């Protein structure tokens, strides 16, 4: 299921991607897109959440760990990135899984090395990444008129320019850290990001970044060359499979992430994922 951006983003995108179309045709396309957007009742909204059920793969077994739930930047947000968000969401939902078994995050492993183990050493990088299978859930039109294939990286330069934020001499994109920090209050700020520059840019790769829990000199530097498309619901239900109990027995998503970061048994694996 494709997520629709806001009408303003649709309008600017059509004018940018269809420069040769007449003004009348552009107006017609914008009107059609607006109608589709208004009728998209099941598409993700400003309150939509993305979840990943995670297990730990050991040498002899696979242990159920828990659920990571993220609040997504909504399509009505001024720093919403329609292509990057839609690709992430549709891979999690498996919308192309019927025609391409690798167009999903199910079965994908989080990177696992000394740099991903929170053992108090300088090696830990406060970020946990999933490369995915290298398949995308969307296709995009390029400036030269060609269309990307599902296993080819995509980009959205115009929208990225509108959603860029300077940071320590560099740039990060998407929703601003300060805005999310305000929404989280006094709680930790853990961001869901996708790479914009470097390895994995425009592909299935995403990262979970523990910005506020990192050393003070790191902080937002961890976001450079990436885009924020959501943040961890730290108090969210962390029970594997969801539907945890109301008596406080179930872990929170933050507790699941912290255990995942500390454990040394084996690589975390995404067993199930989707939109809540």
Image (cartoon, grey):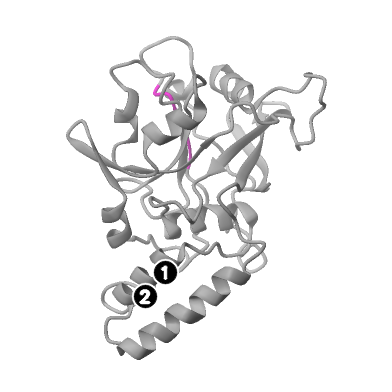
Are the two marked residues, 1 and 2, in contact with CB atoms closer than 8 angstroms?
yes
Q: Main secondary structure of the magenta part?
A: strand
The residue depicted at 38 percent of the width and 34 percent of the height is 177
Left or right: residue 272 versus residue 198 is right
Q: On screen, 234 above or below 18?
A: above
Residue 10 coordinates in the image, percent (x, y): 42, 69
Residue 248 coordinates in the image, percent (x, y): 77, 19
The residue depicted at 62 percent of the width and 21 percent of the height is 255
Which part of the image, by quadrant, shows the N terminus?
A: bottom right
- From where the camera sits, is residue 222 visible? yes
Residue range of the region highlighted in magenta in the rendering: 125-130
- From where the camera sits, is residue 128 visible? no
Residue 29 coordinates in the image, percent (x, y): 44, 82
The numbered dot on residue 22 is: none
Q: On screen, 48 above or below 59?
A: below
Mark 1–mark 2 Cα distance, whole angstroms, equals 6 Å
The numbered dot on residue 14 is: 2
Residue 42, quarter of the rendered image: bottom right
Residue 127 in the magenta stretch? The answer is: yes
Left or right: residue 82 versus residue 224 is right
Q: Label 2 crowding class (10 Å Cα cut-off): few <14, some 14-19, many 20+?
A: some
């Amino acid at each position: 299921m494709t997520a629709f951006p806001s009408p303003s983003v649709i309008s600017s995108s059509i004018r940018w991607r269809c420069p040769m179309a007449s003004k009348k045709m552009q107006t017609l396309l914008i009107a059609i897109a607006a109608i589709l957007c208004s009728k998209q009742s099941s598409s993700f909204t400003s309150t939509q959440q993305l979840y990943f059920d995670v297990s730990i793969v050991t040498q002899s077994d696979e242990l159920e760990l828990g659920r990571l739930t993220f609040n997504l930047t909504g399509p009505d947000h001024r720093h919403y990135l329609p292509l990057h968000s839609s690709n992430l969401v549709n891979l999690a939902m498996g919308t192309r899984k019927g025609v391409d078994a690798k167009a999903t995050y199910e079965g994908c492993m989080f990177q696992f090395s000394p740099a991903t183990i929170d053992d108090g050493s300088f090696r830990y990088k406060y970020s946990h990444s999933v490369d995915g299978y290298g398949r995308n859930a969307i296709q995009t039109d390029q400036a030269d008129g060609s269309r990307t294939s599902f296993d080819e990286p995509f980009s959205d330069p115009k929208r990225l320019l509108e959603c860029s934020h300077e940071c320590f001499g560099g740039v990060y994109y998407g929703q601003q850290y300060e805005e999310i920090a305000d929404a989280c209050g006094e709680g930790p700020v853990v961001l869901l990001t996708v790479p914009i520059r470097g390895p994995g840019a425009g592909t299935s790769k995403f990262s979970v970044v523990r910005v506020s829990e990192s050393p003070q000199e790191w902080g937002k530097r961890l976001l450079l060359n990436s885009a924020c498309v959501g943040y961890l619901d730290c108090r969210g239900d962390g029970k594997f499979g969801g539907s945890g109990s109301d008596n406080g027995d179930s872990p929170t998503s933050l507790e699941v992430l912290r255990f995942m970061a500390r454990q040394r048994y084996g690589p975390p694996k995404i067993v199930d994922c989707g939109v809540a």
